[in-house]
Amino acid sequence: MDMKIVVLGAGAVGLTIAAKLSRVADVHAVARKRHADAVRERGLLMTGIWGEGAYRFSCSEDLPDAWLDADYYIITAKSTDTEAVCRQFAGAIRGREVVSLQNGIGNEEIIGRFTDRVIGGMIITGFEWRGDASVHVSVEAAPMKLGRFPSGMDDAVGRLADLIGEAGIRVEATGGIRSDLWSKTLYNCALNPLGAVTNVPYGALTDPHAWAIVTAIVREAYQVVEAEGVTLPWETAEAYLEYLRTTQLPATATHHSSMLQDLTLGRRTEIDFLNGAVADLGRRHGIDVPYNTCITELIHFREQL
């Protein structure tokens, strides 16, 4: 019998992953009406590095009763919607395997209030809307990572990783998912809000004045990560900053902040799951984090304009 997968809060990321998984599993995606209608009418249209074509799978605005016994529920909603998604589908996800494929720190903890079977996920891939239920996959910086949250590996994680790999997506199972989540969060904390406030592409943030702010944000975050007991691939903040400057920034030099797009469209940002999470954890550990606190407050100010 095919594995049953439900994707909750399916936007560009969720619909594309649902499309790929539909070739190797039974899939249902919960999405906005215009996307669900388009998927039902002609399928999810995909272009780019993950392949091209139309993918048909079950998709609607709700969760039909037939999908209440899914093997895995994958949440791909914006972090600001995690609590609402969990509450809406609490009856379905309670006691089930629930995967977070989202940005920032804190989503897994929210999900953990609704089920004791939480799988953390990290994905650094570019998904661009090209119309209703039409997505272009532009870049893939690293394989997807999956691991039992907060740490460890088990058969459920391994089975899902095998299935995603079979679907044609690069993926690795890990026993230290918190390290991967924080590694991605560091990049977002360093560049995303500052790029939004200044309205410049990431490459411009190498200017000495901007880089001084980036440096301070990263150094504060490293203190928090250390207090949280998380080990990162880079031993020091300076080592990560060098990697950011020489490797990550050149690859995304022309990229504009997704947070800037949210502000432009009048949407809530994910700042509370990025620099805001660093600020909250800093206060909890008695660590002074003025730069992360300041950039968080600036973004909240911009959200109200």
Image (cartoon, rainbow, N blue to C red):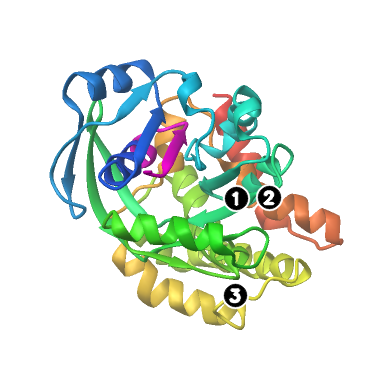
Query: Is any atom of residue 150 visible in this view?
Result: yes
Mark seen at residue 274: 1
**Magenta residues (range):** 1-14
Disc 2 marks a residue whose amino acid type is Ala
Disc 1 marks a residue whose amino acid type is Leu
The verdict on residue 8 being magenta is: yes
Residue 130: quarter of image: top left
Q: Nearer the viewer, residue 74 or 258?
A: 74
Mark seen at residue 105: none
Residue 17: quarter of image: top left
Residue wearing tag 2: 277
Picture coordinates of residue 99 (x, y %)? 54, 47
Q: Nearer the viewer, residue 255 or 9?
A: 9
Picture coordinates of residue 284 (x, y %)? 84, 55
Q: Is residue 179 above or below residue 15?
A: below
- Distance from disc 1 to disc 2, alpha carbons, whole Å, reads 5 Å
* Earlier-in-chain disc, 1 versus 3: 3
